[in-house]
Amino acid sequence: MLETEYDEQKAMELFRLEGWNEGRQVGITEGIIHTISAYRECGLDDNTIISRIMEKYNLSTELAGKYVSSTEQ
């Protein structure tokens, strides 16, 4: 019986961590989108925005480009 209870506790901890990681990723994505929006409001071109979010969020060129193209004005 104790082994079953321990496994249940371990599973609950894993679910909690998965939820936390998903929430964190959503927050990061929202931050990137808001950053892109702010850069656009400042009149920066897409290549400069890509370069800046690559630095700020440690993204690859490909991923930064996907973020920028998905948030077209």
Image (tube, rainbow, N blue to C red):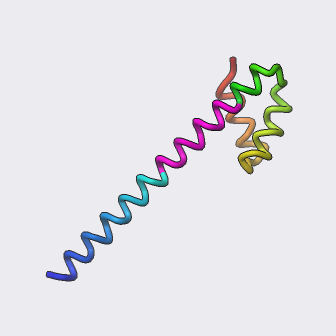
Q: Is residue 29 left or right of residue 44?
A: left
Q: In this view, does 73 lie above or below 15?
A: above
12 in the magenta segment: no
| Main SS class of the magenta portion in the image | helix
Outermost residue to the left: 1
Horizontal and vertical percent for residue 59? 73, 48
Identity of the residue drawn at 54% across and 42% down: 27
User: Is residue 15 toward the left or the right of residue 69 in the image?
Assistant: left
Against 39, residue 19 (above or below) is: below
Q: In this view, does 16 lie above or below 61?
A: below
Location of residue 62 (image quadrant): top right
Q: Decide: is 8 above or below 60.
A: below
Q: Where is residue 73 in the image (x, y as percent from the top left)?
A: 69, 17
Q: In this view, does 12 lie to the left or right of 20?
A: left
**Quadrant of the image containing the N terminus:** bottom left
Q: Residue at x 47, y 49 (%)?
A: 22
Provide the residue span drawn in magenta.
22-35
Residue that sits furthest to the top in the current view: 73
* Residue in the picture at 49% in, 54% down: 21
Residue 56 in the figure: left or right of residue 12: right
Q: In the rendered structure, does residue 32 fall within the stretch colored magenta?
A: yes
Q: Where is residue 17 in the image (x, y as percent from the top left)?
A: 42, 60
> Where is residue 54, by image quadrant?
top right
The residue drawn where x is 66% and y is 25% is 71
* Residue 68 figure quarter: top right
Nearest the eye: 20 or 68: 20
Counting the numbered discs, the total is: 0
